[in-house]
Image: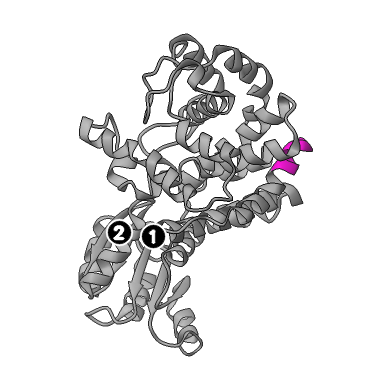
């Protein structure tokens, strides 16, 4: 349908159409850490702009000037270029009363006002990733549950960040149970396959880190409980990236010194979210706080080195770098697993624990073969 080859090469573009400038800006701000965003004031401007640059999804308010959101959707469905673009219609009216009109005009989903940021992100992500996530229903029970439960948790994390509240770690722990069970039953490859084309990059990267970090822990003989901590740490290690502007998070090419300082801020942001709940395991905190530290002290945020870095920090650094190299991004294709391991071995000997890296290479290359 709309999941074309070109969408796999760039971050999706979401068009926000709303005559209320404050509402429009708030919605755009909420989405910009995940997607490229363009804003339109009225129906005519949106139609003109969308024909010049077709969005991957349109979020339109039913009271948009120039004819209203329903008319925009109907016009799009008659347009050869825009007919298949998915649309979410927002409305402050009673959901049951407007649902028939939403369906009749051809919108894909309704978002009733007022809504939380997590609901907005969950709805946009669900519509954009409908084809990917529908494919999860055909998977065996463990990987299916792992994918569905972790995306549900991830969609709700943004509320904790917005409200300055902690994460209910019991929910994270429960969501990671199917993931760890899949690892223990050698049933994890469908998880890696199922997440690789998901358009929420931070989620896709985090679940990949959680999966491979858990596999690493299981391979070296850690207990079920310890592997659960690894999975939770992997899933939450980058939650602070939700505070980083999209233009920095997904910038092609090198970041400026100023932009890199902003990017580094995701680590203390992650710690702040996790520290708001005293039930978060210490291992999860270490993974979030230290996965960018390096053995020679050149990492961040604290410049820890050598014996200051325990095994959890060393393992998570290896897995995070491996996943970053092999991830598909807006500015680069995925690197082959073998090539990534060669670079990590040959060029990062001062940064990474080479004994653990050798174990990772020997035990985990199978995890990403053909994935």
Q: Residue at x 55, y 43 (%)?
A: 235
Left or right: 180 as drawn, with respect to 358: right
Residue 134: tell me if it is visible: yes
Which residue is labeled 2 in the image? 29
Write down the region rendered in magenta.
180-187
| Position of residue 191 measured from the top left corner of the image (x, y, whole percent) | 64, 42
Label 1 SS: helix
Q: Which mark is on residue 162?
A: 1
Quadrant of the rendered structure where residue 259 is? Answer: top left
Q: Using the image, determine if residue 217 lies above or below residue 239.
A: above
Q: How many marks?
A: 2
User: Of label 1 and label 2, which has the lower sequence position?
Assistant: 2
Q: Are marks 1 and 2 in contact (CB under 8 Å)?
A: no
Q: Residue at x 33, y 35 (%)?
A: 264
Q: What colour scheme has been applied to the protein in the rendered image?
A: one colour
Left or right: 222 as drawn, with respect to 94: right
Q: Using the image, determine if residue 117 lies above or below residue 338.
A: below
Q: Which mark is on residue 20?
A: none
């Amino acid at each position: 349908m709309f999941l074309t080859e070109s969408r796999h090469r760039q971050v999706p573009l979401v068009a926000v159409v709303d005559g209320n400038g404050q509402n429009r800006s708030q919605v755009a701000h909420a989405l910009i850490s995940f997607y490229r965003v363009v804003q339109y004031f009225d129906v005519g401007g949106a139609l003109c702009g969308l024909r010049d640059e077709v969005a991957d999804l349109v979020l339109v308010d039913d009271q948009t000037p120039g004819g209203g959101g329903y008319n925009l959707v109907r016009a799009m469905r008659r347009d050869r270029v825009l007919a298949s673009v998915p649309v979410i219609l927002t409305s402050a009216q009673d959901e049951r009363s407007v649902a028939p009109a939403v369906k009749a005009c051809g919108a894909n989903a309704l978002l009733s006002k007022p809504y939380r940021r997590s609901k907005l992100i969950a709805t946009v992500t669900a519509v954009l990733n409908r084809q990917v996530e529908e494919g999860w229903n055909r998977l065996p029970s463990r990987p299916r549950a792992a994918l569905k439960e972790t995306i549900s948790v991830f969609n709700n994390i943004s509320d904790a960040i917005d409200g300055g509240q902690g994460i209910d770690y019991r929910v994270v722990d429960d969501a990671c149970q199917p993931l760890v069970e899949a690892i223990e039953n050698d049933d994890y490859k469908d998880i890696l396959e199922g997440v690789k084309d998901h358009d929420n990059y931070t989620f896709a990267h985090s679940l990949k880190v959680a999966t491979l970090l858990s596999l690493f822990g299981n391979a070296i003989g850690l207990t079920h409980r310890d592997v659960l901590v690894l999975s939770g740490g992997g899933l939450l290690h980058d939650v602070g990236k939700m505070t980083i502007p999209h233009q920095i998070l997904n910038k092609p090419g090198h970041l400026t010194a100023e932009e890199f300082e902003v990017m580094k801020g995701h680590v203390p942001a992650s710690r702040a979210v996790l520290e708001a709940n005293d039930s978060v395991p210490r291992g999860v905190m270490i993974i979030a706080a230290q996965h960018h530290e390096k053995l020679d002290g050149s990492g961040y945020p604290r410049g820890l080195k050598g014996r200051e870095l325990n095994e959890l920090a060393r393992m998570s650094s290896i897995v995070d770098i491996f996943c970053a190299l092999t991830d598909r991004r807006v500015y680069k294709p995925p690197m082959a697993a073998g090539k990534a391991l060669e670079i990590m071995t040959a060029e990062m000997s001062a940064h990474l624990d080479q004994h653990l890296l050798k174990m990772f290479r020997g035990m985990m290359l199978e995890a990403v073969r053909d994935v």
